[in-house]
Image (cartoon, rainbow, N blue to C red):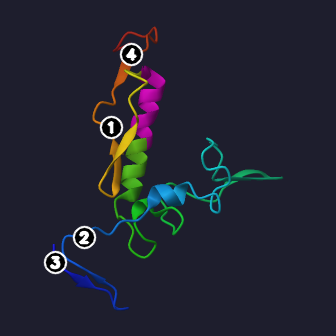
Amino acid sequence: MTPFTFSDGTHVPANNWIVVPQQCMMKDPEHYPEPETFDGFRFVTRSEEGAVSESRLSHPSWRFPFWGSVKQACPARFYVTDMTKLIVSRFIMNFDFKLADDKVPGSFAWGPLRVPHPYLAFLLKERDMGVTPGN
């Protein structure tokens, strides 16, 4: 890596990391009420006409920087979003799964990153759907 100086004069020496603090942003109660509580409808607005989603998983925003910045977002985000939904839905429909050891932490810090724990493992069991393949 090489050193870099931004237009405002901010200098980043060689071999330093610049990262977006996504976890801190996603758990900020100023942006998301009760961020530690699961809410499957967090990004859906309820109105008299019904539930309306204001956000899309594939759309970048300053509050949800998963796909990069608003000005320069990942061009493959639509494809990746669709494929992820297909894969996850197949797993949910066709498999029962649980943690192999629920005492293993889900992640750990590695430098400035939070990564999955290397000993984290899932047990999968295919559901018997009562259907023979090919029928």
Magenta part of the protein: which range? 85-98
Kind of residue indicated by mark 1: His
- Residue 92 located within the stretch drawn in magenta: yes
Question: Label 1 crowding class (10 Å Cα cut-off): few <14, some 14-19, many 20+?
Answer: few
Q: Earlier in the sequence, mark 2 or mark 4?
A: 2
| Residue at (54% x, 65% y) in the render | 63
Residue under circle 2? 16
Residue under circle 1? 117
Kind of residue indicated by mark 2: Asn
Residue 60 position within the rendered picture, expressed as x and y whole percent measured from the top left: 48, 65
| Residue at (40% x, 43% y) in the render | 84
- From this view, report whether residue 101 is shown above or below residue 131: below
Kind of residue indicated by mark 3: Thr
CA gap, disc 2 and disc 1? 24 Å
Residue 128 position within the rendered picture, expressed as x and y whole percent measured from the top left: 43, 10
Label 2 vs label 4, nearer the camera: 2
**Tag 4, which secondary structure?**
strand
Residue under circle 3? 2
CA gap, disc 1 and disc 4? 25 Å
> Residue 131 — which label?
none
**Tag 2, which secondary structure?**
loop
Q: Assess whether mark 4 and mark 1 are in contact (beta carbons under 8 angstroms).
A: no
Q: Assess whether mark 3 and mark 4 are in contact (beta carbons under 8 angstroms).
A: no
Label 3 vs label 2, nearer the camera: 2
Q: Earlier in the sequence, mark 3 or mark 2?
A: 3
User: Looking at the image, which residue sits at the far bottom?
Assistant: 8
| Residue at (38% x, 73% y) in the render | 72
